[in-house]
Amino acid sequence: MAANCVVNPRSAARLSKAAARCQATKARKAHARSAGKPAPSAARIQGLQSLVRPFRSAGASKDPLLDPLDATAVEFEDLYGERDACGVGFIANIEGKRSKTVVDKAIQGLSCMEHRGACSADDDSGDGAGVMTEIPWKLLASEIDGVEEGKCGVGMVFLPQDEAGAQNCKSFITKYAEDLGFEVLGWRDVPVNKDVVGVMAKETEPVMAQIVVKGDFADFETLDKELYVLRKRIEKEVTSIYGPEDECYVCSMSTKTIVYKGMLRSAVVQTYFLDLQNDLFETAFCIYHRRFSTNTVPKWPLAQPMRFLGHNGEINTLQGNLNIMNSREKLLSHPKWAGHEEDLLPICKGSGASDSANLDRVAELLTRTDFDVEDTMMLLVPEAYDNHPDLDTKYPEVKSFYKYYEGLQEGWDGPALLVFSDGDKVGARLDRNGLRPARFWQTDDGFVYMASEVGVLNDVFDSASKVVRKGRLGPGQMLSVDLKEGTVKTNIEIAKTAAAKKPYSEWAKNIVEFDPKSFSYKDTTQMTAEEALEMQIAFGYGIEDSQMIIEAMATNGVEATFCMGDTIALPVLSGRPHLLYDYFKQRFAQVTNPPIDPLREGLVMSLAVRIGRRGNLLKPEADSVKQVNLTSPVLIEEELDEIMKTDFLQSKKFSTFFKSGESIKAAVEALCADVEKAVRSGCQSVVLSDKPEGRLSADTPAIPILLAAGAVNHHLISCGLRTEASIIAETAQCFSTHHFACLIGYGVSAVCPYLALEACRQWRMSDRTESLVKKGRVANLSVEDVQHNFKIAINKGLKKILSKMGFSLLSSYQGAQIFDIYGLADDVVATSFIGSTSRIGGMTLDDLSKETVSFWNKAFPELPSKLEFFGFITSRPTGEYHAANPEMSKLLHKAVGLGGKNPAIENFKAYQEHQEKAPITTLRDMLEVSSDRSPIPIEEVESATEMVERFCTGGMSLGAISRETHEVIAIAMNRMGGKSNSGEGGEDPVRWKPMEDVNADGLSDTFSYL
């Protein structure tokens, strides 16, 4: 019955119509535009025809992680959907005694986690549930001859549904095993009860099989290593046949552990896998997991536990983690893997793998190399070691451990409860914020239990007398049970043991600390007022940028407060040129992933960044980390000078200027080539600079710094050199927190905003400011103070931006590309922003070059007397059009009867006409209803009063919005006959009582705002 919604092709006639609308509204006060301002150009809307194209940006026709010889950034669109919010736990016998009881108790705990998971529309196909246990050697030995613990390995494999495909997979797996020297004892059909599988899950249900191999190797470690190589070879073959969709998937292949999992509900895991009912199935531990798959269609391979861990939470920094790992993998080496280096690649997987699966892959590699399982979890998910009084005074060696590895491995950051096992140890690790619940208890019969919540065994009261120890994991803490040693260790004991294995305190001395207090701000202006104005105009500053952003931060040390949104046109639809940053929108936390409060949780947040190369992660040594540590990415001039003078960095500046009229693409490519050559020659600090040696030249504009930095970042990734050098931007074109966030998000480690700092100095030393100080309207701050305030404001703003996405560490935000792009064409994305999503096309490199030159030319040949008013922040007749403008507000008020006037249809028509004639500002303005169906008679349409009775508000907690908003929404729903949701945070108990203080006028002291 509904009409189709299609994209208007924006024909020439439509463009003319849009242009006419823009011109027709100039004379109207609220709609007046600057004289002679052009309508949206054809170049700006190029690509908008493909609004409903597949959501993939340029350069992403294949999974870039599949080819180890051609590193590139991963696609955010492939990763964005694969997030989890789950229930997880484990049971372990401290002395390593195996029994069927462990399985049964774990299944009971898993069944109590059903509320932590989700089901498909059939209410029967679970997002995923499963268990990880020790290999059931007795069970296997009863069915397959020759099975011998210590000499055998077992692979749990999902085979294709079709018989020919399954047989083909069995054949090449068998061949690869034999090539590595294994004897294949046999394939085993895993007995399952297909009747308990949901309808939707059954469509993709794989064939469950196990392969048992035996190897005569020198030692147990070699056997385990060869099994890992075997699995990696199998993965490559599967990818070559099926692509990234895991038609054949190895759940586990180990000498110690095995994984049973699937798209099942918790309650049917044991019913489905008949092995789990067999009395011969004995294990000393069991990890269990129930998956809630966020924003994605569940898949059998993505059920958990993975091969090494089970994860409740989300890894927010995933794209940055994968980009760095992808670049780093060519440089990883270890004697253990000699001759097998190519077999290990790719380490991570972009398309088809979740955040949990990729973290599992990295953790597994480290543990199978030379890292203890506990050390692995510490360096991948580090606790907040800065400003930690215990670590500072009692355990400085632990702080040195974290400090050292921070220079080798960026943290996998986000809310996470990780339960892990390598077969010898089983444990749990909580993220640095402690944003996921983790309870544990130990009983006098030798068991340790850990779960997302208490009561999962339904024996809280019965077992209370047996509990000898209990608690919960705090932020960044760990619990570990050593099944071989028969010990239970908590966080400090684990951390001290890990820190004592190598001389990390000595190695950490190679890290040069830059103390901000050791550097001085410039105490006077470095340019004349004319030179500063010329540069500000050339680099795209407007009067609002100067007064409402830079001066506000310089005065108060915080960002100025604006409205929660803006109603100007998207840059690609605007008639005015925009800075490149304006085409990027920051992402924010998902429903299952709470943002951080940067004020109350500041202790776990860090803006520290490292400058310098990262050594070989698999073989950490004394010289693997020799870097400069910055407490903030905001550099003042003196700090940058010191970096340039630091010998081991071999810093080098690269000019971003290009000749006007020449191809900006060619200039970017030349810049990338120069940087690559320098990095190969030992440069560890690449400084991209648009700072002229003298005055600006009219015919030599600068490449937008974001375009240059993004291109260099991805070029180094593609060359496998990204971990060999850091990128620093010395730029005039960076003055707001969003600008800093964009640069850092696309790979820049630090920024020296020399023109913004100069603008602070110019403002403070101006006659106007001196007059305001004398009148007491502005605080009497020194030149140094205003620059410091600017830096503090940027730091605060960056923490706020990190917190929106649930990030704690700026080092993890770096290169994470947590942005959506609106209005850039494929060639721009392919050049500088590979992996980011640009769904609508738009401005090409040539278009951006023209915008850059248009800003530049405003400063030449005649310098204006002041900065231009663009109107991007405030609505004025001479500035950018704002959809929310005074005239629109007046018409809307009249239409709904505000101001004591009765609503009338003619008032609404006036408002409607105003909106129809308004310039295009959003994508939906370009949509038109196109249908070949006859209109539905209005008599057949349900009345509005009946429709609203089915309305229901979202579950907004009392802590999320104000009490007034909460209750006004509830009253509105009551009047309409709909439903209101009080939310997780509950509601004020006063609402449970009848209102008894309402006077004759209908007013109440309790609810005075109603």
Image: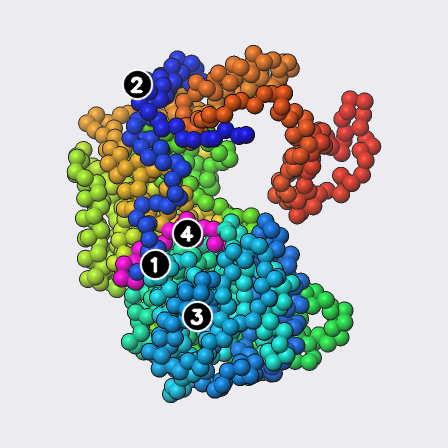
Left or right: where 729 falls relative to 251 = left
Circle 2 residues within 10 Å: few <14, some 14–19, many ≥20: few
Disc with the residue nearer the chain's start (1 vs 4): 1
Q: Which mark is residue 364?
A: 3
Q: Is residue 71 magenta?
A: yes
Please say whether residue 902 is visible from this viewpoint. Answer: yes
Q: Are marks 1 and 4 in contact (CB under 8 Å)?
A: no
Q: Secondary structure at mark 1?
A: loop
Q: Which amino acid, mark 4? A: Asp
Q: Earlier in the sequence, mark 1 or mark 3?
A: 1
> Going from the N terminus, do you reach mark 2 or mark 4 first?
2
Q: In the image, which disc is placed on residue 921?
A: none
* Amino acid under disc 2: Gly
Judging depth in this view, the residue of 224 and 474 nearest the camera is: 224
Point out the frontmost of discs 1 and 3. Answer: 1
> Looking at the image, is mark 4 or mark 3 earlier in the sequence?
4
Label 4 packing within 10 angstroms: few (<14), some (14-19), many (20+) = some
Q: With respect to residue 400, does 603 lie above or below?
A: above
Q: Which residue is mark 4?
A: 78
Q: Which mark is residue 65?
A: 1
Q: Which residues are magenta?
A: 68-84
